[in-house]
Every structure is written in C-alpha cells, then in structure tokens.
Image (spheres, rainbow, N blue to C red):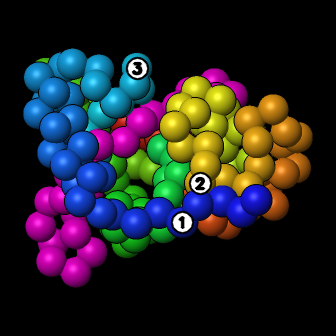
Amino acid sequence: MMAREYRLGTLRKSVNALVKPLLARGVPAAGKGGVLLTTKGRKSGADRTTPVNVVEAGGDRWLVAPYGAVAWVHNLRAEPVARLRRGGKRETWEVEEADAATAAPVLRAYVRQIPVTAPYFDAKGSGPVEAFEAEADRHPVFRLARSRA
C-alpha cells in the first residue's frame, strides 16, 4: 500500500480554522506539541500562519512536514525563521533543514507521537529508521536551532 497524497481540501481548511483560535488561546488542540507557526511568505512577504506540531527527539525540537513540501516549508527554505505561538507563549527560532540521515529518527518519532499522519508515510512507526530515511525527501524536517529571543 502506498502513502496517501495530501490535498488541502475543505475538511482540512475547516479543521485548521477551528484549531487556530484554540491554539491562539493556549488550548492544546492539535496535540500536546500543537503550536501556531508563522512564516514570512516567500513571494508576498506577508505573514502566513498555520497549525503545526513540534516534536522532541534526540534532545532537540523539530518541525516536521508530514504532508510534504507545503507552503510553510517553502517559506522556511526562503527565510529560515519560525515564529511559534500557543496562548501567550511566543518564541522565534532560526531553523536548519535536516538531511535524510538526521531526519529519519525524527520522522519515526513524529509518526509514533502523531499517528493521524501515519497514512502519509510508507514507513510504519514500528519499522526501522532506515525505512524513514528512504522517504525523508518527501517529508521535510527542520531543527529549531537558535532562539531569537
């Protein structure tokens, strides 16, 4: 069975519209790692905000794009600064995109912690890390590298 392909349809837009105000108020609506990520639009320069999950693995914090190279991924590649918010807590981070070998254990941890994303991966959460390395190019991973307080 092949991984499902992500499409930003009406249902996902509706869920995001419901989750955003909850996260803005501090309610952990998208899982315990749920935050609002704001990036600078690579073309427009305007702020773009979307709910994401931060996962902790290997002593670091990571942003994972389980649905592939979506808009926020392109924005971070153009300007590697992530502004995270949940409730009154705000953080600004410089990010570094991980290579496949570094991303693989993070992807496995992500699928285990956020199983709703599992259908978008060929590798299974119980599978070997090498299986995640093989598909790391389809699921970009960014390490929260340096806080910009």
Mark 1 or 3: in front is 1
Q: In this view, does 1 lie to the left or right of 120?
A: right
**Identity of the amino acid at label 3?**
Lys
The range drawn in magenta is 38-62
What element does badge 3 sit on?
A: loop
Q: In which quarter of the image is the N terminus?
A: bottom right
Q: Which mark is residue 120?
A: 2
Circle 1 is placed at which residue position? 5
Dividing the picture into quadrants, the one containing residue 72 is: bottom left
Kindly identify the residue that appears in the image at 85 percent across and 39 percent down.
127
Q: Magenta: predominant secondary structure element?
A: strand
Q: Mark 3 points at which residue?
A: 32
Circles 2 and 3: CB distance less than 8 Å? no
Whether residue 82 can be seen here: yes
Q: Is residue 100 above or below residue 60?
A: below
Residue 57 colored magenta?
Answer: yes
**Disc 2 versus disc 3: distance between alpha carbons?**
20 Å
Circle 3 crowding by C-alpha within 10 Å: few under 14, some 14–19, many from 20 = few
Q: Which is more toward the observer, 12 or 97?
A: 12
Residue 111 location in percent, x, y?
63, 37
State the SS at label 2: helix
Q: Distance between the residues labelled 1 and 3?
A: 25 Å
